[in-house]
Image (tube, coloured by chain):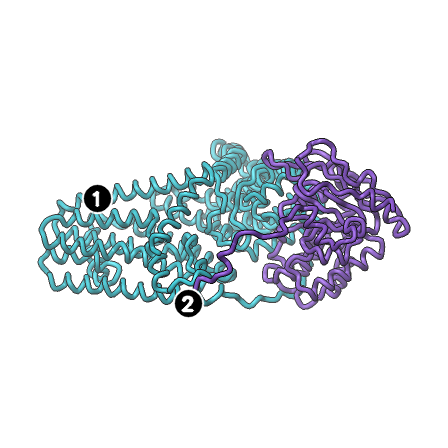
Chain colours: A cyan, B purple
Amino acid sequence: MVAQFLRLKLTLLANNFRRGPGQLAGMVIGLLYGLGLAAVVTAGLGALRLATPDIARVILIVFGAIVVLAFLLLPLAFGVDDTIDPRKFTLFGIKTGRLALSLVIAGAVSVPALVVTIFSIAQVVTWSRGTVPVLFSLLAAVLIVPTCVLGARVSAGLAAAFFSSRRSRDASGIVLVLVLAIAAPLVALGATTDWQAQGLPVVRRIAAVVSWTPFGAAWSAPGDAALGRLDIAWIKIAIAVAFLLVLWFVWRALVADMLVRPQRETAPGHYAGLGWFERLPATPLGAIAARSLSYWGRDARYRVSLAVIPIVPIVMVVALLIAGVPAGFIVWLPVPIMCLFLGWTVHNDIAYDSSAFWAHVSADTKGTDDRWGRIVPALLVGIPLVLVGSFTSVLVVGDYSIFPGLVGLSLCVLLVALGISSVISAGFPYPAVHPGDSPFAQPQAAGTSGPVIQSLSFLVAIVLSSPVVVLVFFFPALPSVQYLGLGLGAVVGIGALVGGVYWGGHIVDRRAPELLAFTLQN
Amino acid sequence: MPEAAVVEAKPARPAKPRGKQKSGKELFPDVAAGKKGSTTVLSVRGLTKSFDDKLAVDRIDLEVKVGAFYGIVGPNGAGKTTTLSMITGLLRPDSGTVVVNGSDVWTDTVQAKRMMGVLPDRLRLFDRLTGGQLLYYAGVLRGLDNAVVRERTADLAHAFGLEESLGRLVSDYSAGMTKKIALAAAMIHSPRLLVLDEPFESVDPVSAATVTQILKKYVSAGGTVVLSSHSMDLVQRICDHVAVVVRGEILADGTMAEVRNGQTLEERFVELAGGRTTVEGLEWLHSFSD
């Protein structure tokens, strides 16, 4: 049974390699990245062999706890490879215990599991300074690997049990974004702490607590043994064994539960009236705009890209302030960057429709109607953002003279980015996450074209907006240069927007069936 | 009986002759004479499409008269969906023409598409819209004004039994309801020709009866329906014309009586498609493993 599951998992892995050069490259990069990381860490852990037992112990505890927590938490946020989801074996009539065990062992065939195995071997090297520590480190290694593998399966199983319905999965995406938003200032705080002076005491304090938790216990046992505290080492091992047993029973219960319970359903909600469709004119353009607005509100893929927009400039501003960049320069960044991302939200909009795009093809919708309709939401959000954001920015730095220039630059970036998106989404669509899938899932046919197109469209937007930057920054002495910047920004922006919409519309008119065929392929 | 003679079926497994097949089309007399007029509403000539050197549709000719209820049947992978996609302008053919009521779908696109209502198979809908929004969207994209769309939405919802569901997201619909709302969206601009790909798949018998009734009413009012289906019984019951498509070619077409030739449609179909009548092997299935 176990052998069959291993063979199944290996076949699934091998099939990944057959799916095309993009998949192959992705797998190879993932593997190299994992192995590279493992190599660096292994070298570090090997070097710890020369450190005093005390220091090696606290560093290993904190590091090990982070590794275990990563295995437990990351599946919650990002989902996990569900090719061997227990549900898929419902109909085979395999005994629950054997199925649970087989699935865990098959799940161990993965890059993360390989990496953690290497770590746990490296920690044996760290403690190769006496028979007793080596014995304990071997025991720890035997506990750490199954704890991580099993922990990841349990988290994924719990996530599937509680987040599997569409609505709550939408919610989980938002939760992750919020966590990132909170984490950003913490990281900034961490970056500013004087680690050289206070680092070790901080690690020591963390280790003292973590070593008694299931996450750090196994990592701590060899160190305790090396320091001669054998009784404590045995207690830590007992904690680790108990945790592993708990994980096993939870996993077994989860598998048993998943085998008999179908996917969770949520009670469908009810919407009165036609929403945005009532507020916009009954023309193809108005209807497409209303449809886009409804999707921005309801579709997690749009909501996540929108939620990220305010985070990027916050992180950037914090980082630059810490680096000592003057506020008079930083004030030019947040609003234009938010505008850039906002305009960029719609750069793969047809792929987001997936094959539902047939409705436009079948109705022979005019390309320009399609293009304008899709950017209406971005304009409705973007124009107030430009005005309010610019005003807030100048208010914070107290320099009202730059207000027109800042509005000009932000407007220019927004409109240019929307114009480019209009062309890109029609001319160079790339595979996107399917409607209803988790916004953090990888598109099923991930190619290499995505990142190239993304960075290229960013670059073009920046290049096209640069005249305004050049004018405002390099000719500050010109009379009423700020108003010139506003005018130039508006002219360049409107020109790029209208040009992009008509060019993109022309592509849609000419290649609508081919675009539909593209959405069907991925 | 000249008609029975003209509908000639190819042998079940032709030895792949690449020459021009003489299927019934050219000889096809106006069988609908005496029914609704003889105007052609859909004319397909030499439609061909291949995917990566694999020929999916091989020079298909079709002639559909006004008021026909035309069924296209064929085994899985016969090219039914490919053919209908090319007819509706969703897939560009390699060669061949499609003319709807005098307008070529691939050159006079605006006119031709306006006259067609389309229900594709296995394409998504904008399913984060509610049922009501989806119908409104379909209607307005087709150029209807606000008042007309709202009136027809109410009528269609009543006819299809979807009144209670207009306020729910289409993604929460069952498969059968999704089919019905898509069908309603295809009809909202009162097209001359309805092209429906598998309209009865995953629709329950009660809803199927409703849909059939609506379509029959539409046909009796002068509309024309072209549909594809796996269900031979259903096609035999509701269609008056039928074409049998196998491996991208039309093996037989004509009125239902001509094609059936005294058999049930299912028997005739299996005969034409060259299905195996006796299942051999699988003896182990007669003894159970536990």
Mark with earlier residue (1, 2): 1
Between label 1 and label 2, give the one nearer the viewer: 2
Q: Is residue A29 above or below residue A262?
A: above
**Chain letter for the residue marked with disc 1 in the picture:** A
Q: Residue at x 55, y 52 (%)?
A: A435
Closest to the observer: A111 or A367?
A111
List x then y, in percent, for residue B144: 77, 53
Q: CA distance from mark 1 to mark 2?
A: 42 Å
**Chain letter for the residue marked with disc 2 in the picture:** A
Total residue callouts: 2
Q: Is residue A50 left or right of residue A345?
A: left
Q: Is residue B287 above or below residue A389?
A: below
Residue A257: assigned label: 2
List x then y, in percent, for residue A299: 55, 55
Disc 1: which residue:
A44
Q: Is residue B163 above or below residue A373?
A: below
Q: Is residue B239 left or right of residue A306?
A: right
Disc 1 crowd rating (10 Å Cα; few below 14, some 14-19, many 20+) is some
